Image (cartoon, coloured by chain):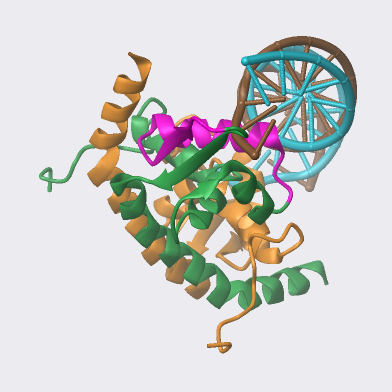
Chain colours: A orange, B green, C cyan, D brown
DNA sequence: CGGAATCCGCGAAGATACTG
DNA sequence: CAGTATCTTCGCGGATTCCG
């Protein structure tokens, strides 16, 4: 049983809570989602994620890169081209993420229903 | 293809993005996690989720209640007792959430490793 | 094109005090 | 015990400008 890691997100200082924060942030999940089907350029990601600013997209991509979730490739061309791609680690995250998406699409009506009843 | 729901989290105004925000917020996942094994009192949840303030705990629980994820039961006693419990909807969310936790605990070393290399 | 740097507003979140 | 009310701080995130 103690083969399980003792990462404890309920502790304030545990790294696993930072991970929750990362996943929880507004853009990471969406950005990783756009990269599901293959590498994309910066501007392509920006176009697909509606409402993200250039600054936040940069921050999100950089953070994901630092965490080893995506790789960043710069091509020495004019005009410059930069491609982002899911790493093996990043791809392994897609599965639980899709489970979450599946839940969301399935149960969204229930949530909306609960909300409308709460308003009454 | 379009038998799939057309919830599109990539659109700025889609409800499913609100759901991402909800799940993504700092405390919801942790709070729902504490309720996995049965109902808890307010103070018990507070004690288990390290670092959460009463204010944020209240907000989180209220939001979860509005979304139909938890139920809130007030007992007419002195001193007052309030219990929070996962609803059926809330319990259905635990599965994808645990998948996420599992990923986090499994791959945390990889992430930390990537970070340390990024620092170099 | 793909950023970096700067400024700044506003809402989220913590601390504190009080109440039913 | 389980909140509410109020204040203040803090940093996220948008807009803009400039650079290689």
How many numbered discs sit on the rendered protein? Answer: 0
B53 in the magenta segment: yes
Tell me: residue A57, above or below residue B105.
above
In the image shown, does A61 or B86 lie closer to the viewer? B86
Side (left or right) of A10 relative to B102: right
Residue at image coords 65%, 47%: B46
Q: Position of residue A56 (x, y in %)?
A: 63, 39
| Quadrant in which residue A110 is drawn | top left
- Tell me if residue A102 can be seen: yes
Residue at image coords 52%, 88%: A1
Quarter of the image that includes the C terminus of chain A: top left
Q: Position of residue A48 (x, y in %)?
A: 41, 40
Residue at image coords 46%, 66%: A93
Tell me: residue A18, above or below residue B8.
below
Tell me: residue B59, above or below residue B114.
above
In the image shown, does B56 or B22 lie closer to the viewer? B56
Q: Which residues are magenta?
A: B51-77
Residue at image coords 50%, 65%: B101
Tell me: residue A34, above or below residue A91.
above
Q: Position of residue A43 (x, y in %)?
A: 50, 42
A94 in the magenta segment: no
Q: Position of residue B5 (x, y in %)?
A: 19, 41
Residue extending furthest front?
B78
In the image shown, does B78 or B56 lie closer to the viewer? B78
- Tell me if residue A76 can be seen: no
């Amino acid at each position: 049983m103690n083969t399980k890691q003792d990462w404890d997100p309920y502790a304030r200082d545990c790294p696993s809570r930072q991970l929750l924060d990362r996943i929880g942030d507004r853009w990471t999940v969406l950005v990783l989602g756009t990269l599901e089907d293959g590498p994309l350029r910066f501007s392509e990601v920006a176009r697909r994620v509606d409402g993200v600013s250039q600054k936040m997209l940069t921050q999100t991509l950089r953070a994901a890169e630092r965490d080893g979730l995506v790789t960043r490739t710069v091509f020495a061309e004019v005009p410059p081209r930069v491609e982002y791609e899911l790493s093996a680690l990043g791809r392994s995250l897609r599965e639980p993420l899709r489970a979450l998406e599946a839940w969301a699409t399935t149960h969204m009506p229930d949530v909306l229903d609960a909300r409308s009843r709460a308003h009454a």
